[in-house]
């Protein structure tokens, strides 16, 4: 407790001294090991902090709820997925069915694209805690990601019966398919929005109101709701556009002459990185590719980012930051590639290809192709205005797409992304294959044949059978990906053209329309 107080006061050296004493006397104490891991993180000693988290995992059986919650959060922070899954499987029943533990585990399983496991774990706890609104919301989200929409709606409505102002449940309900007519009580929703007690809750309820008004064709009111939601969400995220400007500039300055030299040459599979802006169609492409008998679908993985953090001995809250770029001159790229291959191997299921669909890995292309010489890069392109408008109306996590709640910042980020992709193509000719959303929606067979040719495999017609093959999807596209791709006669953003003038002006000269 004394060490915790010192850490909170910023007195790290004094806290470290107490930690040394505790661990000298009790080297296998899990809580002490977790606290030391957090202490090392406070000083940005990533490798050491990760080591203490691993030691905490190896400290015997979990015996109480507090140990469980703290341990699982530390393991997830370092993307120690195998250890996290092992710890969850070994939990005694009395801990596993605790409501707080089940809610956390469901969220963790969702984050590694295992919604079925999330649903099963939370279901057991819900039997003992039927009046937990958060558990009902967790079950609703898992069912939504599994495509079991009617069951998802039942759980989400039960959540709102227990806790009527539960903002995440309102948002997830609005995501369910259908025309939405009469699904949500707008007067009740507006009442909860007016009484929201946090900017995050106000943002979720505002995005929900925008979506419902849009479905009803009331675009003027929907525009106002969207503006309010974005303003609220911008209060939640910590975003400095100047940092991104420096990051993009540093990435373009990376030496690329070495090409693939020094990377990991012995991967037993071919990693396929699907990159692009969020909301550009990356989930759709991955699900189509998953219809091929030799391709395993990984979802949005942070395994490569974790290897960069290890190499730099630095934790960044996003996919990459300036400190990692600056440390990259000393990277052991073979170790990065080997670490990545080892960390994702469990997902292969005997297949020769694995898709890694973290869109923002476009930032890491220079590192990826250096560390994994056999990697393939599929770059998803969609009309800039459609892409950005879709970003603008989506509440992401606090560390994802932080630029997407202000039209000026969003347009600036898109321009930098577009410029960086042009740079990567020049640096790595023939290594990046562009897939356009328009072609995937209008002539999917031809577009998939081109993608298959780039990957070096035969096209299979089963890649078009998305209705039957879509499994758990833990992204904002969980609903849309289960519908046949199509292009609307009138792009969605056109209904909001006047509102989107700042965005359109700043994107007018960005390449062609895709």
Image (cartoon, rainbow, N blue to C red):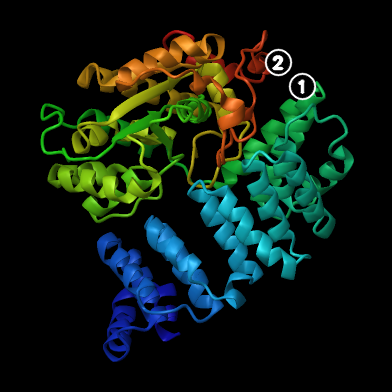
Q: Dot 1: few (<14), some (14–19), or many (≥20) neighbours within 10 Å?
A: some
Q: What residue is rendered at 39% in x and 63% in y?
A: 83
Question: Tags 2 and 1 in contact by the CB under 8 Å rule?
Answer: yes
Which residue is under mark 1?
219
Q: Extreme bottom residue here?
A: 25
Q: What residue is rendered at 17% in x and 40% in y?
A: 266
Q: Earlier in the sequence, mark 2 or mark 1?
A: 1
- Secondary structure of the residue carrying numbered label 1: helix
Where on the picture, by quarter, is residue 176? top right
Residue 219 located left or right of residue 431? right
Where on the picture, by quarter, is residue 58? bottom left
On-image quarter of the N terminus: bottom left
Q: What residue is rendered at 32% in x and 82% in y?
A: 19
Residue 62 located left or right of residue 257? right
Which residue is under mark 2?
495
Residue 84 numbered tag: none
Q: Position of residue 102 (x, y in %)?
A: 61, 64
Residue 23 located left or right of residue 208? left
Task: Using the image as rendered, state which of residue 116 and residue 131 is in the foreground.
Answer: 116
Task: Using the image as rendered, state which of residue 454 and residue 26 is in the foreground.
Answer: 454
- Secondary structure of the residue carrying numbered label 2: helix
Task: Using the image as rendered, state which of residue 346 and residue 473 is in the foreground.
Answer: 346
Q: What distance separates the C-alpha of mark 2 from that of mark 1?
A: 7 Å
Q: Is residue 318 above or below residue 369?
A: below
Q: Position of residue 94 (x, y in %)?
A: 61, 77
Q: What residue is rendered at 70% in x and 43% in y?
A: 172
- Residue 245 seen in render: no
């Amino acid at each position: 407790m004394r060490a915790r107080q010192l850490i909170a006061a910023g007195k790290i050296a004094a806290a470290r001294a107490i930690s040394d004493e505790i661990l000298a006397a009790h080297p296998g104490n899990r809580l002490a090991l977790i606290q030391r891991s957090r202490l090392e993180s406070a000083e940005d000693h990533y490798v050491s902090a990760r080591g203490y988290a691993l030691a905490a995992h190896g400290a015997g059986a979990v015996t109480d709820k507090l140990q469980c919650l703290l341990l699982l959060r530390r393991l997830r922070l370092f993307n120690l997925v195998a250890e996290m899954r092992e710890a969850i499987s070994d939990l005694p029943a009395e801990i596993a069915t605790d409501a707080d533990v089940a809610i956390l585990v469901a969220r963790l399983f969702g984050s590694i694209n295992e919604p079925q496991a999330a649903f099963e774990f939370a279901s057991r706890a819900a039997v003992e805690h039927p009046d937990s609104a958060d558990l009902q919301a967790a079950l609703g989200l898992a069912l939504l990601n599994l495509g079991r929409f009617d069951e998802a709606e039942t759980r989400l409505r039960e959540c709102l019966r227990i806790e009527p102002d539960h903002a995440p449940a309102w948002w997830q309900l609005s995501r369910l398919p259908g025309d939405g007519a009469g699904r949500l009580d707008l007067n009740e929703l507006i009442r909860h929005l007016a009484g929201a007690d946090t900017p995050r809750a106000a943002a979720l309820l505002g995005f929900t109101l925008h979506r419902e008004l849009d479905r009803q064709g009331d675009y003027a009111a929907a525009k106002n709701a969207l503006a309010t939601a974005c303003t609220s969400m911008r209060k939640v995220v910590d975003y400095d556009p100047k940092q991104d400007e420096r990051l993009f500039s540093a990435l373009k300055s990376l030496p690329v002459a070495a090409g693939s030299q020094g990377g990991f040459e012995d991967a037993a599979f071919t990693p396929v990185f699907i990159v692009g802006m969020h909301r550009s169609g990356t989930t759709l492409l991955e699900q189509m590719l998953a219809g091929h008998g030799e391709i395993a679908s990984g979802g949005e993985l942070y395994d490569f980012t974790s290897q960069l953090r290890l190499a730099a001995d630095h934790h960044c809250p996003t996919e990459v930051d300036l400190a990692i770029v600056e440390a990259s001159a000393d990277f052991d790229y073979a170790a990065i590639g080997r670490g990545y291959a080892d960390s994702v191997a469990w997902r292969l299921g005997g297949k020769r290809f694995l898709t890694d669909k973290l869109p923002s890995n476009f930032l890491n292309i220079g590192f990826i192709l250096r560390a994994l010489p056999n990697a393939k890069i599929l770059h998803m392109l969609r009309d800039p205005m459609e892409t950005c408008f879709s970003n603008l109306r989506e509440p992401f996590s606090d560390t994802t797409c932080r630029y997407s709640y202000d039209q000026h910042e969003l347009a600036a980020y898109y321009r930098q992304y577009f410029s960086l992709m042009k740079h990567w193509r020049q640096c790595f000719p023939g290594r990046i294959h562009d897939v356009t959303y328009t072609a995937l929606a209008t002539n999917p067979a031809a577009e998939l044949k081109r993608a298959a040719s780039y990957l070096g495999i035969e096209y299979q017609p089963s890649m078009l059978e998305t209705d039957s093959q879509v499994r758990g999807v833990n992204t904002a596209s969980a609903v849309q990906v289960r519908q046949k791709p199509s292009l609307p006669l009138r792009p969605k953003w056109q209904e909001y053209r006047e509102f989107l003038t700042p965005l359109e002006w700043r994107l007018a000269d960005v390449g062609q329309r895709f």
